[in-house]
């Protein structure tokens, strides 16, 4: 897989494609997205952009990485949420990368492309609030490291602010289906954990699976204490980024042979 590091990927950003693409274009895009997802999941979930409807593409910001031969190597699909009193919030969503294209920093590049593409168009100044809902320790750790004001986070605020609570409550009340949170899951308003969110689904993870652990053990321990993996718990993170955050994210150290390869998830992968 080392050869993937030398591939010159073509990066593309699509903003709310369900509002302007033709039916044929959406059908073709859906097939390509599902083909990538099929290399990452045992069963492709009917979730997010993989559903393929115009409505599901209408509230997404999507970045794509194309190989020189025209094949789609990976994608990052972010969900745009309306929160009264806050504005538009970006849910970090679903990221998938083909196995042959991992270990090339592609997940990082896809996330960066989607976030910067959105910020240039919609939020060049001020805070862009973001959410992430995950049982993947590497995902939770990366959000804690690379975004600001993240709750819950070992270096974030000790207690959620009113804005954190408002966003979390809106997700809990209105966006469960969009984010693949089970309708029977119980939301812990203090820890920001959805209890039983993904039990017996493709998104449930094994705490001991090294593929989904962060390289920093302290982050694994912090988030691991919040969840019961066997019951399918997930952590909801709420934080924000700015243009300066994006610049730091862009200049983040490139992965080395010591770093873990990327894996598919319903949020930022490792």
Image (spheres, rainbow, N blue to C red):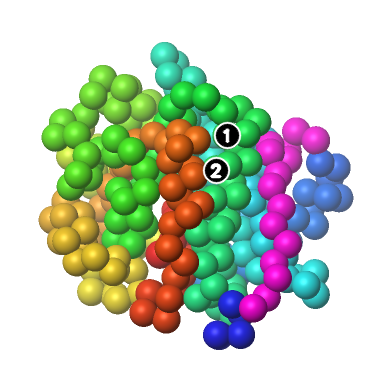
Decide: is 220 above or below 189. Answer: below
- The quarter of the picture where residue 213 lies is bottom left
Quadrant of the frame with the C terminus: bottom left
Quadrant of the frame with the N terminus: bottom right
Left-right relation of 68 to 151: right
Decide: is 185 above or below 27. Answer: above
The span from disc 2 to disc 1 (Cα, nearest Å) is 6 Å
Mark 1 highlights which residue? 119
Q: Position of residue 55 (x, y in %)?
A: 67, 36
Q: Position of residue 113 (x, y in %)?
A: 60, 50
Q: Position of residue 130 (x, y in %)?
A: 42, 36
Mark 2 highlights which residue? 115
Answer whether residue 48 is visible to the viewer in this image. Answer: no
Q: Secondary structure at mark 2?
A: helix
The structure residue drawn at horizontal position 40% and vertical position 39%, both measured from the top left corner, is 131
Q: Are marks 2 and 1 in contact (CB under 8 Å)?
A: yes
**49 or 104, which lies in front?**
104
Q: Position of residue 261 (x, y in %)?
A: 44, 75
The structure residue drawn at horizontal position 64% and vertical position 51%, both measured from the top left corner, is 63
Q: Secondary structure at mark 1?
A: helix
Left-right relation of 59 to 126: right
**Magenta-drawn segment:** 6-20
Left-right relation of 81 to 35: left
Count of numbered badges drawn on the protein: 2
User: Residue 240: within the magenta?
Assistant: no
- The quarter of the picture where residue 175 lies is top left
- The quarter of the picture where residue 198 lies is bottom left
Labelled disc at residue 19: none
User: Residue 7: within the magenta?
Assistant: yes
**157 or 165, which lies in front?**
157
């Amino acid at each position: 897989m080392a050869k993937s590091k030398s591939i010159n990927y073509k990066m593309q950003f699509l903003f709310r494609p369900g509002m302007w693409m033709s039916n044929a274009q959406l059908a073709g895009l859906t097939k390509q997205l599902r083909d990538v997802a099929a290399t990452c999941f045992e069963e492709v979930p009917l979730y997010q952009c993989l559903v393929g409807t115009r409505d599901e593409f209408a509230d997404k910001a999507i970045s794509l990485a194309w190989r020189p031969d025209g094949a789609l190597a990976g994608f990052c699909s972010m969900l745009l949420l309306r929160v009264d009193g806050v504005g538009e919030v970006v849910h970090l969503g679903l990221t998938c990368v083909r196995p042959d294209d991992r270990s090339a920093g592609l997940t990082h590049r896809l996330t960066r492309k989607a976030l910067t593409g959105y910020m240039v168009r919609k939020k060049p100044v001020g805070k862009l609030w973001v959410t992430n809902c995950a049982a993947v320790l590497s995902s939770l750790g990366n959000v804690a490291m690379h975004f600001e004001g993240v709750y819950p986070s070992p270096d974030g605020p000790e207690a959620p602010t009113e804005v954190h609570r408002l966003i979390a409550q809106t997700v809990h009340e209105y966006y469960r289906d969009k984010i693949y949170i089970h309708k029977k899951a119980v939301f812990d308003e203090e820890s920001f954990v959805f209890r039983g969110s993904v039990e017996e689904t493709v998104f449930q993870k094994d705490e001991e699976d090294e593929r989904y652990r962060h390289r920093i053990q302290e982050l694994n321990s912090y988030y691991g204490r919040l969840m019961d993996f066997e019951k399918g718990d997930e952590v909801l993170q709420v934080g924000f980024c700015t243009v300066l955050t994006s610049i730091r994210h862009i200049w983040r150290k490139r992965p080395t042979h010591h770093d873990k390869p990327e894996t598919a998830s319903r949020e930022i992968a490792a």
